[in-house]
Image: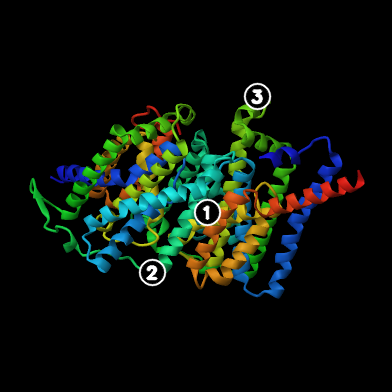
Amino acid sequence: MLESRSVEKPAAGVFRRKTLLLDLLAVAVPVVGFAFGINIFANELLLVYMMVYVALAHGINISYGFTGYLPFGYFGFFGAGAYGATLAILDLHVPALIGMLFGGVAGVLFGLLLLPLFRLRGAYFAIATLAAGEAIADIVANPSLQSVTNGPYGENLASVYSSGQIYVAALVFMALALLAVVLVKNSRFGLALRAIKESEYSAAMAGVNVVRMRSLAWVIAAAIAGVGGAIFGWATTVFYPSAVFDSAISVFAIVFALFGGTGSVWGPTLGTVLLYGLYSAVGLSSPQYFQLIYGLAIVVLVLFAPRGLVGFGRAAGRMISLRRAGANG
Amino acid sequence: MLFEYSIIAGILLGLFYALMAMGLNLVFGVQRIINLAHGDMVMLGGFGAWELYYGYHLNPVLAIVVMVPITVVVGYGLYYLLIPRLKSAVDFETLSLVLFFGVSQVVEALSALGFGNNERSLPVTSIPSQPVHLFGQFYPADWWVAAGVALPLLGIFFLYLYRTRLGRETRAVMADEHEAVSVGIDAGRVSAISFGVGLALAAAAGVLAVFVFGGVDPSEGVSITITAFAIIVFGSLGNPLGTVVGSILFGVAYQLAQVYTPSWSNLVPYILVIGTMLLRPQGLFGRRTRVA
């Protein structure tokens, strides 16, 4: 909490320009990395999933890192996006790329539906979104709705599969999500969100339109999850409701974001690349060991390093500059 | 006919749900901790009963007697291991949610490694298994056993909370921790014991859950936690009697849904928790509690 106060010093213009440059690098490096990564590491599907998770972790970053609301039911938006896109492609016959936008719209619509939950604070909000996510999963997978969603039997997008398009779409999507975080972080909007996170009451007193700002952040996070789910569904091709409405999706996104450090542009990206890489290496063959590792990681993080990897980096940087100041003085 | 059946079945299962949710409410009421690993404790109780039955031929109902003191001690230790460090955090409630989510993942992973991923069940003959005939309907015997075990356990819990010194101190900490400390109550010790008692209630419910849910598997924790949370929010957070009433109403609502719209019945707990939070955040008996 202290850091957000010390990071944003309106007077220190040089300092701000420097952080903006660092933030833009945090967009450019992953985008270039994934654009060329495909030449080095050939598992295309894994890279697509990783890009989707980078974006999801940043969706959590916007909702939790900046605004302080932890959406445990984030997978609800993700699944809504996957189904929104699929239904648009199969029933409305829109091109797959346009279908991805429909995924975003589905995510946003579900997000708007949940706006009343903002009446709740902290942990209650988290649990209520979890219940909402489970509820929409149950509704979509319900056998009574088989004529619309094909119920529990899933969807098939094989007719529009195109590996090149999927990869580019995922890359562009991740870039946009990262840019959104940079914009949020370096704008008055981001400042307002942090003020709300510190104290809703004081923010309102200082003239921040709490409801509008919070809703806007929520809609951005919902859109990211919706498009992410759409691209995930497109890349997976054949999926069951249980695959896109999986609470593990929220869990991964939250853990990746916390591990890297929320409230920053580098943190969630680093967290995702490291942990999802680890998951791909050991998690697929022995999921229990991976679950054990990330469970322990959460416990250790919460107790000993609530600011994540980025927190370590900042602490190190502060120590170096202090030492330098000491040497000069 | 089906209507009466739903009501009676709902009351029987409601008593079981009350036992399942009570520990979560106690832990929340005392320390504002949302124990997302609560459902995993229920799961561990089930596996404990299985191991005791097949390892030592111990009757599952007696297994509860063995497990309760062990769980209280484990919970006491776990409390001191995790909570004091967390207490200083700014956003304690949300962080406790995340922390116990991590604990829940660790427990699930270890259980899957230790017990395997398959569902395990106990033979119905380990408890009285003759279906009970009442008003022209047959009720599974394990529902009567679950209700018959849950009721005295809840009774003992209420005696502990309302008729003993420790229970009075617990209620004092629930009402206001600072005031409690200022009259000489050791809030840390009381909270640690409550945490242990909360886990013990979960473990006891877990033994019965093997029969009521037809088995136990390592991944069942999350849905149990959500159901228990829905119940305690509905019956007012921090209010033990509210949990009992809320559980019975939930049990009846769930049974009615099962009978009349079986495919939508799984939505009941989610609708309950979202509906309560939006329409009446203080729950059924919103007294002596905080508002969500």
Co-location on one chain, circles 1 and 3: yes
Residue type (three-letter) at the residue carrying disc 1: Ser
Pair 3/2: label in front: 2
- On the question of residue B48 being in view, the answer is yes
Hey, which residue is sitting farthest top in the picture?
A: A205
- Which dot marks residue B116? 2
**Direction from residue A38 to residue A131 in the image, left or right:** left
Residue depicted at 63% across the width and 60% down the height: A272
Co-location on one chain, circles 3 and 2: no
Q: Chain of mark 3?
A: A
What residue did someone put label 1 on? A250
**Direction from residue B204 to residue A288 in the image, left or right:** right
Q: Chain of mark 2?
A: B
Q: Chain of mark 1?
A: A
Residue type (three-letter) at the residue carrying disc 3: Met
Give A124 or A28, whichever is nearer the viewer.
A124
Residue depicted at 56% across the width and 41% down the height: A69
